[in-house]
Image: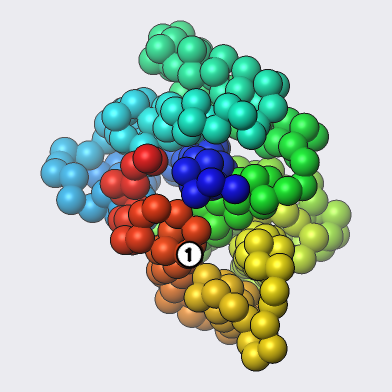
Amino acid sequence: MLSRIAESLYWIGRYVERAEDTARILDVHLHRMLADPWIDEQTACRSLLTVMGLQTIEPPYSSARMVGLLGLDERNPSAVTGALAAARENARGARETISAEMWECLNATWHGLPDARRRVEQQGVHAFFRWVRERCSVMTGLTDATMSRDEGWLFLVLGRSVERVDMTSRLLSTHIGAGGSIPSWLTLLRSCGAWETFLRTYRGSLDDRHAAEFLLLDRLFPRSVFAALATAEACLADLEPEPGRAGVVTEAQRIVGRARTNLEFRGPDELLGDLGTVLSGLQRTCTQVNAAVSTRYFRQTSAVSWVSEVAV
């Protein structure tokens, strides 16, 4: 496969996942502001900007400004609308490898973006975020239903999995900013679409240990950090038909494997006690994997910072 096509597919996976997860994070932030009127808005917004890598933004801070910066800024590929636009632009360069249904989904979503601000004004931000999640879920479903399990699919799923690790760790970081309360865990689980599955798994027992264990370590829930790391590791292994006689072949495999092992063999209580450090380490892992994948497979060989990532 041409490196240009592989890179476009990788970034389609990352940008679609980024749009969905950024919408989830903003939804969590706004729900928390509504649920707890005693939260200082300036402090909460500054904490969110730090989590999302935008700590250089100058005050004043407000929820409306956060929605504008992280939701409706089409020039910023780290924002919801910017990520969707970037995904569509990458799809233009990979039309011959994606299905017509995938292209139509991304194109229709992109054409719906000019109405995003009007949708927010008329229906509220939560309706807009729900629309984004639905469109991204449709795209994910079409990817799994209409693409052959070849190299193109592996690169797209690899990009989705790397971004999911990064964004789930950022979503969990918003919990730390909320003080680690039980209502914060409840909101977090709902925002991940994990609430009903969590209830069935733990029989309704909501405490810090169980929630952290589920979102970080669960092998069966696809949005858990461990499941995303395992999927990325499997994709990287399939992209290398010759595994070699000693260890793994690529630097990306080593980085992902170390992160997965470090997470797998930590107990839930240990993870909870060192949650901030663990989450920061996962975000660094994603940056390192991105650089290693780019060096191995794509034309770009330099690492790209999370905030200013721009697809080629």
Residue farthest bottom in this picture = 246
- x 54%, y 57%: residue: 162
Measuring 58% from the left and 27% from the top, which residue is drawn there?
95
Foreground of the two, 246 or 183:
246
Pick whichever, 19 or 258, lies toward us: 258
Residue nearer the viewer, 269 or 149:
149
Q: Is residue 212 above or below residue 200?
A: below
- Which quadrant of the view contains residue 191? top right
Name above or below for residue 66 compared with residue 274. above
> Is disc 1 surrounded by few (<14), some (14 to 19) or many (20+) residues within 10 Å?
some
- For the residue marked with disc 1, what is the amino acid? Arg
Quadrant including the C terminus = top left
- The answer to whether residue 192 is seen in the rendering is no
Q: Which residue in the rendered view is the most extreme toward the front? A: 2
Q: Is residue 254 above or below residue 15?
A: below
Q: Is residue 193 visible?
A: yes
| Vertical comparison of 292 with 263: above or below | above
**Residue plotted at (64% across, 34% down):** 97
Residue 117: image location, x then y, percent:
39, 15
Q: Which residue is mark 1?
A: 296
Percent coordinates x, y for residue 211 in the rendering = 66, 63
Secondary structure of the residue carrying tag 1 is helix
